[in-house]
Amino acid sequence: MADTPNNWVEVEKHGEKKILAEVGKETFEVAINVSLKNGKIISATINNPVEVLSRECEDTELSRCGPPKRFQVLRRIAVK
């Protein structure tokens, strides 16, 4: 998989006077096993990591912000 630009953005009110601004890269890795006899799904897995850069800001223009924090959100779903 090639490197891709940011494709995930979230801005939300965080408390009375703070705004949380986040940007990142979200990818999906999907594996599905299907029965060749009847077409039914035997099992499936989804890995959905999001690499996030987050900043807490003081204004709605997002111009007065604190230092950036990096973290990862990882969602994993399995069906058997």
Image (cartoon, helix red, strand yellow):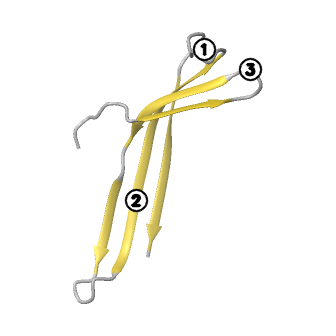
Number of the label disc, if any, that sits on residue 46: 2
| Percent position of residue 33, x then y | 30, 73
Number of the label disc, if any, that sits on residue 17: 3
Query: Is 38 on the left or on the right of 43, as rendered?
Result: left
- Cβ atoms under marks 3 and 2 closer than 8 Å: no
Mark 3 Cα-neighbour bin, 10 Å: few <14, some 14–19, many ≥20: few
Instruction: Give the image quarter of residue 78.
Output: bottom left
| Percent position of residue 37, x then y | 23, 89
Query: Is 35 on the left or on the right of 75, as rendered?
Result: left
| Percent position of residue 66, x then y | 60, 14
Q: CA distance from mark 1 to mark 2?
A: 34 Å
Q: Which residue is mark 1?
A: 66
Q: Which label sits in the foreground, 3 or 2?
A: 3
Q: Earlier in the sequence, mark 3 or mark 2?
A: 3
Against 33, is 2 above or below?
A: above
Q: Secondary structure at mark 2?
A: strand
Number of the label disc, if any, that sits on residue 27: none
Q: CA distance from mark 1 to mark 3?
A: 13 Å
